[in-house]
Amino acid sequence: MAHDPMTTATSSAPARRGLPLLLGANLAANLGDGIAKVAFPLLAATVTRDPVLIAGLSAAQFLPWLLLAVLAGALLDRVDRRKAIVLANTARAAAIGGMTVLVLTDSTSIWLVYIGALVVGVAEVVADSAANVLIPSVVDQNGLSGANSKLQATEIVGQTFAGGPVGSLTFAVFAAFPFLLTSASFAIGAALLLALAGSFRPQRSAASDAPDRPAAALRSDLADGMRWLIRDPVMWRLVVAAGGLALTSELAQAQLVLYALEDLSLSEAAFGVFGLVGGLGGLAGAAIASRLVDRFRGRYVLASAMAAAGAAFIAMGNSAQPVASAVLFGVFAGAVVIANVLLATVRHRLVPGELLGRVLGVWRTVVWGMLPVGALFGGLLTTVLGSTSATFAFSGVCQIALGAVTLAAVLLLDRQRTTGSAAEAE
């Protein structure tokens, strides 16, 4: 039987304390993210209904991942990762506080909304990357899939299950209310990690930390991470697959607010409830992801998740019923969570700890960098096709095709390895 590179077993290491604090801080910060990700597009929709400008907001939120993820990853292999999260969450709390003042004084425009989303996105690059690379430091390796499932669950509960409804309902009360709550959530996320004892700076050789050539050392760090990723046949295939999934799914996701408000005729308050129903599917995905990843071959889990996500979007593109569309969005969310848990677990198992920040930086530059590209193309696609429903259907077809290509690529790698092993045996 061919070895599955996506379910590689590793040796166990003693578990460290700190996972509950990390999950609590991540939950608080993601609650702020969830509120903001509903409040920002709703605020933008009060000043414009242009699908390209709405898509531009999503691009502004994710542009920092394209520009800064690699640099942030290299820095996270040099600094205390806990402190990085604290500083990033503090910065987000302050930035959203300033946005609150603009809303209260009725000084907003679409360009100021863009700037606010961009500033918050810069801090998000640091905070989210640091939380991800902290996982192997607070749990033993046999518990990686479970810890990644829990981390995904905190993101779903915070961003979708709680943050979405809170953001839309409080926006309906008065527009500045969700921004006040967002600022408080980021502050709580920073405070919780202050209670996490110990140093979380990765161990490095003395040569790599040479103080007289910091710029050269940083360039060398970036090159090391890039080389490792390119040379690993499993990881670079998974980066391409994850980037493709981000691109194809964001074609439609960036248009979700217009799909809900126009195609489904939902109110602003109901938009958050729509997201809440979808979030239930994401939680279901998080609940079963660890079992699927640990029990089945990773190649089939990933391909099946992509196919399920695509089928859900195709059905959404052909649905005019809000309840049915919300359930379908939940199927999509659950499938994406399963894919994310698998990808994160493989990454934690295969990447050496001292390179994890840099490899994650390259990974997220590719994957998250596809989000603003997909968002802008989605806006243009909606303009051409004439409706967001058509964009959802097109996105779903692309995701199913991507799942088939990903499965074929991993099967080809297995065949090459089997042939190589047979040749060596002879």
Image (cartoon, rainbow, N blue to C red):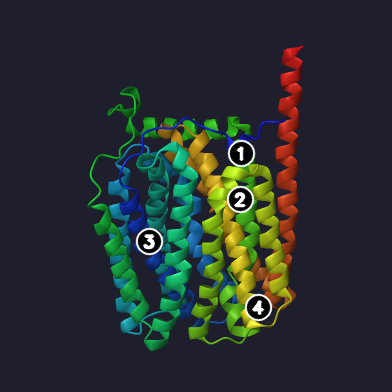
Foreground: 141 or 356? 141
Q: Position of residue 367 (x, y in %)?
A: 56, 51
Foreground: 414 or 241? 414
Residue 191 higher or lower than 323, as above or below? above
Point out which mark residue 6 bears: 1
Q: Earlier in the sequence, mark 3 or mark 2?
A: 3
Point out which mark residue 27 bears: 3
Residue 348 appears in view: yes
Q: Earlier in the sequence, mark 4 or mark 3?
A: 3
Q: Earlier in the sequence, mark 1 or mark 2?
A: 1
Rendering quarter of residue 88: bottom left
Rendering quarter of residue 353: top left
- Helix or strand or loop: what does disc 3 sit on? helix
Report the residue at 36% width, 55% height from top: 23
Number of numbered tags placed on the structure image: 4
Q: Position of residue 199 (x, y in %)?
A: 26, 39
Amino acid bearing label 2 = Gly
Q: Earlier in the sequence, mark 4 or mark 2?
A: 2
- Helix or strand or loop: what does disc 1 sit on? helix
Residue 24 higher or lower than 261, as above or below? above
How many other residues sit within 10 Å of disc 2, few (<14), some (14-19) or many (≥20)?
A: many
Cα distance, mark 1 to mark 4?
A: 34 Å
Q: Are marks 4 and 2 in contact (CB under 8 Å)?
A: no
Residue 78 higher or lower than 82, as above or below? above
**Quadrant, the N terminus:** top right
Q: Earlier in the sequence, mark 1 or mark 4?
A: 1
Report the residue at 30% width, 65% height from top: 93
* Residue under numbered circle 2: 243
Amino acid bearing label 3 = Leu
Q: Earlier in the sequence, mark 3 or mark 1?
A: 1
* Residue under numbered circle 4: 324
